[in-house]
Amino acid sequence: MQDIANQIQSVLWICFALSVAFGAIAQRTHFCTMGAFSDVINMGDWSRMRQWALVMATAMAGFALLSWSGQIDPQQSLYHTTKWLWLSTLLGGALFGIGMVLASGCGNKTLIRMGTGNLKSWVVFVFMGVSAFATLKGLTAVWRTRSIDTVFIDMPAGAHLGTWIATWADLPHVWPVAGLVVAAALSVWVLSSKDFWQADHLLAGLGLGLLVTAMLWVSGHLGFVQEHPETLESVYLTTNSGRMEAMSFVAPMAYLLDWLMFYSDASKVLSFGMVSAVGVVCGAAVSSLLNGSFRWEGFGQTSDLTHHLVGAILMGVGGVTAMGCTIGQGVSGISILSLNALTAVLGIGVGAWMAFKYQTWSLERSI
């Protein structure tokens, strides 16, 4: 058992270190998925959207290579499922998209802004975590499981583009090949823009994508035990789901609040996702202090507070309903070509567009 305890410690410390790097790079390069949608919708600028796409492509290639080399079992990923929950992911994604615009950033950006002195994001973190936990195990969880979660398309081969192609073509290696092909096509589109060839853009796209891949390896390989000495069953250490995870921030925020509130309960222990959330905050804090951008910021007026509270709640409910955020589904889920992730990203885009239109209408109305 001491070996298992040491392995858990190693996994959590490496996870923390990688997350610190993730937060520092994201803060340094101004990586922001909400900002990416804003740039495209309001200014027609695709630079930050290409950043996000390159993160996706890098994570796709990483997942494919890890699977192909046998370092991880792709079917043990949290995002591998036989149900295409198209209604839940679409609606949840839309709620999350609306929420991230109202709250000035998604879950990842909220953690980054927390580290840079933004007190508004600390409020968002609390309300987002509470609403996420309610949607995991509370009132909204009951509503979710009894309504939209009952609507799905059963896909025995897996609700993933790669496994569907592999089954259709009867070729076991098509899944990782499909990932590499999609990653290559996405990379060509990203790098075809001369304006994108800047250090910050490349650092964000390649650096964050590689860190997501590294986190996947830590969770799926370093944290995997073939036969636990107590249960004699295989187990993925430190994950809340009991499966291989990568980076995601909605549910981990909920579990982190739960751990803080019930710290004296020995059954509440730190997990992979919780440590990654703390690491991002710390990384952003270090980066902002080093580059001189750290500053305290609070709410200026009641309407700003209202929008952030509503946005936080929508992100918590929507993120759990969609089974992930712009990083959870938008990178980690996309990396395995999950249909649920693709639907969630579509929903997030639609929700963000609706929220930006609302903001424009609200601004014009006030003039």
Image (cartoon, grey):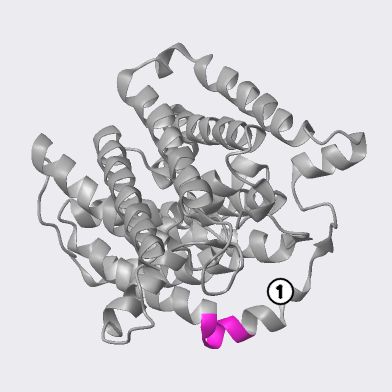
Q: Which residue is mark 1?
A: 148
Q: In the rendered view, tell whether residue 41 sits above or below residue 200.
A: below
Q: Residue at x 53, y 14 (%)?
A: 192
Total numbered labels: 1
As drawn, is 46 to the left or to the right of 142? left
Q: Residue at x 71, y 49 (%)?
A: 339
Q: Residue at x 77, y 32 (%)?
A: 173
Q: Nearer the viewer, residue 263 or 328?
A: 263
* Residue 265 in picture, x, y percent from top left: 32, 87
* Residue 261 in picture, x, y percent from top left: 28, 83
As drawn, is 56 to the left or to the right of 28? right
User: Which residues lie in the magenta part?
Assistant: 137-142
Q: Quadrant of residue 234?
A: bottom right
Q: Main secondary structure of the magenta part?
A: helix
Q: Residue at x 48, y 29 (%)?
A: 50
Q: Secondary structure at mark 1?
A: helix
